Amino acid sequence: MRTIGKATWLAGLFGLGILLLFPSGARAHCDSLDGPVVGVARVALQKGDVTPVLKWVRPQDEGMIKQAFARTLTVRGLGPDARSLADQAFFETLVRIHRQGEGAPYTGLKPAGSAEPGIVMADQALARGSADALIAAVARDIEHGLRERFARVMETREHAGDSVTAGREYVAAYVTFIHYVEGLHEAARATPSDHGTHETAAAHREEER
């Protein structure tokens, strides 16, 4: 693949790295204690202003978050221990409501440092204001994933007719390869508003495997 063609292709696949290259359970960066949702919540609590966190929830959920925030501020005034418990409860409520708005399950807050390397790289790219390093890393992973799955299909195809077992190995390799390519193509064509749809589709493909 030529350099220019590769760069163009990767520009369309920018949002796919986390979606396809890491386990679905690790994609929920927003539910970790060092994720962006909790980070904004900490600042909001320090300032006593709920406004910064409202962007993380749907308009219809604002009232619930405002009530939880007000209760949290009240309890925080009872002492250090009460403040810690109140903050934790607010983080959990906020993240749960945020996840519900995404149509995603909430399985509790994850510890700091639990995000996958790819997610960390994505945040670092945003912090630097440049996607170059992230695109290069995703490109390497995509190329490796395609070559590995393609080679497996070619290898098993040579012996697919030897026995039923060999044939099934070929079919399994073929299906895995096709689903992977399908996911890449869907991600390349996706728009920002398609985030939830394609994440759900990717989860379904992982279950099929």
Image: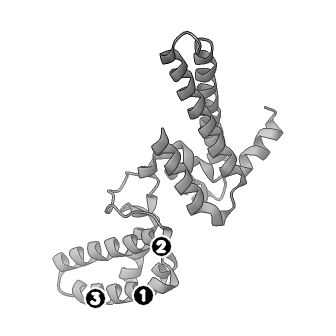
Tell me the tag on residue 135. none
Circle 3 or circle 1, nearest the eye: 3
Q: Does residue 66 sit above or below 193 in this rendering?
A: below
Q: CA distance from mark 3 to mark 1?
A: 13 Å
Residue drawn 53% across and 45% down?
205
In the image, what residue occupies the spot 21% across and 74% down? 85
Per the image, the residue denoted by label 2 is 101
Quick one: 138 or 177, which is closer to the camera? 177
Q: Amino acid at mark 2?
A: Gly
Q: How far apart are the alpha carbons under marks 1 and 2?
A: 22 Å
Please state the total of marks drawn on the protein image.
3
- Where's residue 161, x and y in %? 59, 12
Q: Nearer the viewer, residue 86 or 180?
A: 180
Point out residue 156 in the picture as x, y percentages from the top left corner: 58, 17
Residue 170 sits in which quadrant? top right
First-in-chain label (3 vs 2): 3
Residue carrying label 1: 49
Q: Give the residue type at disc 3.
A: Arg
Residue 94 left/right relative to 132: left
Neighbor class of circle 1 (other Cα within 10 Å; few <14, some 14-19, many 20+) is some
The reply, left or right, for residue 198 in relation to residue 26 is: right
Residue 87 screen position, x and y as percent? 28, 76
Residue at disc 2, secondary structure: helix
Q: Secondary structure at mark 3?
A: helix
Q: Which residue is mark 3?
A: 71
- Image point 60% across, 16% down: which residue? 155
Q: Earlier in the sequence, mark 1 or mark 2?
A: 1
